[in-house]
Image (cartoon, coloured by chain):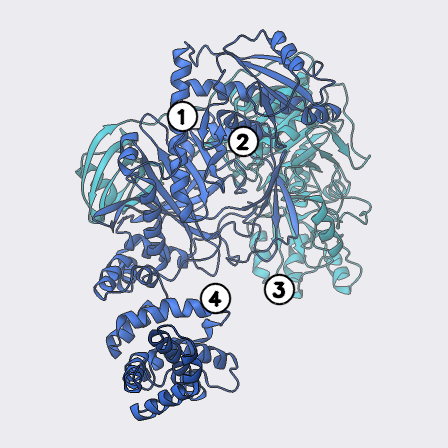
Amino acid sequence: MIKHFGELTHKEYVSLGFKCGLEIHQQLLTQKKLFCHCPAGLYSNKYDVEILRHMRPTLSELGEYDGTALMEFKTKKEIIYRLNNKSACTYEFDDTPPFAMNEEALDIALEIAILLQCNLVSELHISRKQYLDGSIPTGFQRTTILGVDGKIPYKNKKIRIYQLGLEEDSCREISDAGHIRIYNTDRLGMPLIETVTYPDIKDPWEAAEVAEVIRRLTRVTGKVRTGIGATRQDVNVSIKNGTRIEIKGVPRIPLIPKLVHNEAMRQKSLLEIKEKLRKKGFSNTSYKANFCDVTNILKKTKYKPIKEAIENSSLVKAILLPGFKNILSYETQPDVLFEQEISDRVRVIACLDTMPNIISTETRGANLSHTEWEKITTQLGSKNQDAIVIVWGNKQDSETGMKEIEIRAKEAIIGIPSETRQALPNGTNGFERILPGPNRMYPDTDLPPISIADKRIKRISAVIPEPPWKKEKRYIKLKLSEDVIALLVVSKYSKLFDKIVNDLKVAPVLVGVTIIQRLKHLRRKGVNINKISDAQIYQMFEAYKKNRFSKEIIPALLEKIATLSDKKSTVHYELGFEKAYKKLKINPISIKELQIEIKNAYKTYAKVLYKSKVNMRPRMERFLMGKIMNKVIGKVDGKTVRNELKKILNNYGR
Amino acid sequence: MADKYKGYRGEAKDKLIEQKVRVWSDVKIDSTRGKFVGIILPRAETSDDSHIVIKLRNGYNIGLTVNTIKQITETAYEEANYKIPEKEFPYDPKKPNVKLLGTGGTIASRLDYRTGAVIPAFSPGELYGSVPELADICNLQTEKLYGVFSENMGPAQWKGTAEAIAREIKKGTDGIVIGHGTDTMHHTSAILSFMLQDSPVPIVMVGSQRSSDRPSSDAALNLMHATKTAAESDIAEVMVCMFGPTSDEYGLLHRGTRVRKMHSSYRSTFRTIGDIPIAIVDREKITTLRTDYKRRRKDKKVKLNTNFEEKVSIVYYYPNMKPDIIESLIDNEYKGIIIAGTGLGHINKPLYEPIRKACQKGIAVYMTVQTLWGYVQMYVYDTGRDLMDIGIVPAANMLPEVAYVKLGWALGQTNKLEKVKEIMLTPIAGEITDREPHDGYLIYQGGLPEISKFLKSCKK
């Protein structure tokens, strides 16, 4: 049985040999793209032109084709690129050689490499990393290494950084159906850094935490993009005797733990399947499936998917997999059976992407009739230990599918095939493509090496932001809450926070809560907090320090400042605070004035309150407190109000 | 061994010697910027002498500044050795025989991924290894004539290529493909159109705009289109076969004397100028766009005439050009000058005198247009008439580069200017046409709103 996420302890992951490393991709906030002069960050699904390309595998050093390359060639995909004149030029579709690398991007990437404490390279060499899925029209990604062997503190240990690379972002996939894959080129070529960690992560929770630490680190520069798709995680997972599997494009960090857990479980199950097959005496070298065409047998089937396929002149193939009984229905991930591994391959490689694309003797639920299965079983000479898979499609696709089913079955005897897998929303993962081999790096002959002089590194180091872990330590000492610290270290307001706390000596917790939580609440309320300047916040705390108002009014003040600043014409931007202060009429009041307010309130509400017979005192106090605070909010702090109220109530007795 | 420090010089080489390591050493390097592990790679000879390049374990290359390096320790040594896999090219007696003559360029090659050098694939076996689809088209034989970048092609190579083609035709080959760098492919296609006349078989020039080591290369498809044209087409002319659109859809067959490279890097860089292409070729079929081409014949006869006068020049006119430009050509005993004039064929007054001098000295002077599209027309303005009086001969709608090679070829036949003029103005292979079709300028050029709309729906 598959263990679900949450059922395993850290110790159990360790004994499973769980190992995980991260590749974190982060877009940089630059004006232009990395190797051409198109603007970066202009997203639109509108396009002016479509271009059609095919990718062809090129030979590796040893004269062999790379596995992924061959797989992509097998799929015979037509790749269509959509271009918008505003966001792409002839460089994006590989009709113009690269321009010199964007210096702004290089500076930002170097800054992050320095923050990661990497050993910096002295001369950059641009490489081509091959991708044959079409996600980059050249067939390769231009990429370069800036630094290796970095480290950042994490809890009581260190996260080791394998390398930091700077590369161009790929296309956005629009659709991939049948033999046509469509890409949008707006994102293509935007500068992206890739931070790769060593596989030191020992459990799923740690994976998410480390991802978060790295994400924060890049954000302290204030020079990276945020928002959907700006940060993307690839997660590498393996277990003892397993295989390194890359889960691609995890959009959000909180998804990581469950995903990597399920991948560990998948590897465990695949290893168990391998053992079972080996015990039955199968070996991958001698394993052979049996094939036959069963279109005729199923001509009159009532099973709808196949019935419709045959009507569309598809062929139906049956594949006998010796020894696969109870294997196809073996659970590999929560509610996912081994059969899915086969279906995924058929979908991606044979481009048979209408589901279901296979059925088998172990598929649950109604499909073929008993007699139909019997005929097929007889035709293939199936024995008790065997399983049969059925696939359908046009001549070429059904044959590709048939062969792929045999290939995947063989791989089950070897163990866990090297694949990149896609993260699915429910925390499981599905096959994406074969993992590329090591020989897919080529030097880019279009660009000369770039020397990184000491002078440049000194210039960047001089203005490097304080790393988050140092900030964090400082903030812990100030007794800020964990939530506030997490956000404040990467917040654009962290400098303002330091300034207010250091210059004005306002209580750090109040400043932290105001800047991080109060502003967030206001934003959620629909207040445009971008209209509040740092100077206005500073002025506000300056006034607070002079006791011109009490802290309870801060949210109202901020909201007022924002709305006043919205009407730029009437209020000078920097005068926002004083105007808001006046509008809210929060001039402090004396204790005497407060006492009068309390007495008035008591008189107004006393009758109402005495009607009820229960123990009145605490309720009365709460009720009056609320009424009074509404009147005096900001003018005097809540603590004083409560004290005075208590005194007065005591005087009135009862 | 000379290769021990391949490409390194100066302080970088000294460092390697001092540390007792060499190219292909697997090393640990201790530097002021930290530790690095990898293999020392050869250095490009044009690069500076202050960096050592290593390939990291992850396949990336990086450079380390010599003066940051404290120590290099060799842990292993393995020299790289490359070979392109060969598979025997299948022979099918039913298929046409095509000969591929190589002059250079990267029509089929693969990158030496450590050094960045391009290794050409050329033998039939190598080509079959990388473009197996060729075997479905023809029986292929190959011969390497030269291995030069196309800018280094000149009269000697043109003659050699023409002679090699003539030999093949006499042997009875069904079609010729010439692999050529793209930069001067149209010069070569033009001169071959004059040196080889009345070929019985297609002569197809082909190259690639993206080298074949790239997954998105146009090389394989161009090669398939070219061999298909050579093997099957009915068009017995010198043609250039390159991408029509930038999409992987079809190639265009351009007449050798009407074609020009029009973009420094685009895949569909070749355009037929002043006319429309002869045909469209894709994986399945060849669709002719015109009927006035020379047809394939069964005989093995071709007229070969490779005489060529090298003292010919093109003068690309610009405003304020000074007489000394022309005078220097006279002083250097040039025998022919092609002028690429403005508009309908104009140059400024100060050049009249030296040109008069040139004509009087017996130098052949011809006028073509910088606009590329359109005819020279020197009657429209008085200045044009004056120029003709001086002795400049208008060369109709011959492209400047075509006029240049044709004049060299004509002067190779005779010294008599009248005879030269007759040769120059008598079209041999479509270099001068009687009329320009209305759609020649519009088709395949793009840019107009109607065409943009068309492009949007038709994947160009």
Report which colour depicts chain A.
blue
Indicate the secondary structure of the residue bearing disc 1.
helix
Q: CA distance from mark 2 to mark 3?
A: 55 Å
Chain for numbered disc 4? A
- Point out the frontmost of discs 3 and 4: 4
Q: Amino acid at mark 3?
A: Pro
Marks 2/1: CA–CA distance: 27 Å
Residues at badges 3 and 4 in contact (C-beta under 8 Å)? no
Q: Which residue is mark 3?
A: B319
The residue to which callout 4 is attached is A524
Q: Given the image, on which type of amino acid does mark 4 rest?
A: Arg
**Residue beneath the point at 32% across and 55% down:** A217
Which is more N-terminal, label 2 or label 4? 2
Find chain B in the image and tell me its colour. Answer: cyan
- Type of residue at label 1? Ser
Vertical side of A338 occupied by B388: above or below? below
| Badge 4 and badge 1 in a common chain | yes
| Quadrant position of residue A1 | top left
Determine if marks 2 and 3 fall on one subunit: no
Residue at x 29%, y 33% (from the top left corner): A12
* Image: A404 above or below B71: above
Which quarter of the figure has residue A633? Answer: bottom left
Marks 4 and 1: CB-CB under 8 Å? no
**On the rendered structure, is B278 left or right of A150?**
right
Query: Residue B412 in the image: x percent, y percent?
Result: 65, 37
**Residue occupied by mark 1:** A269
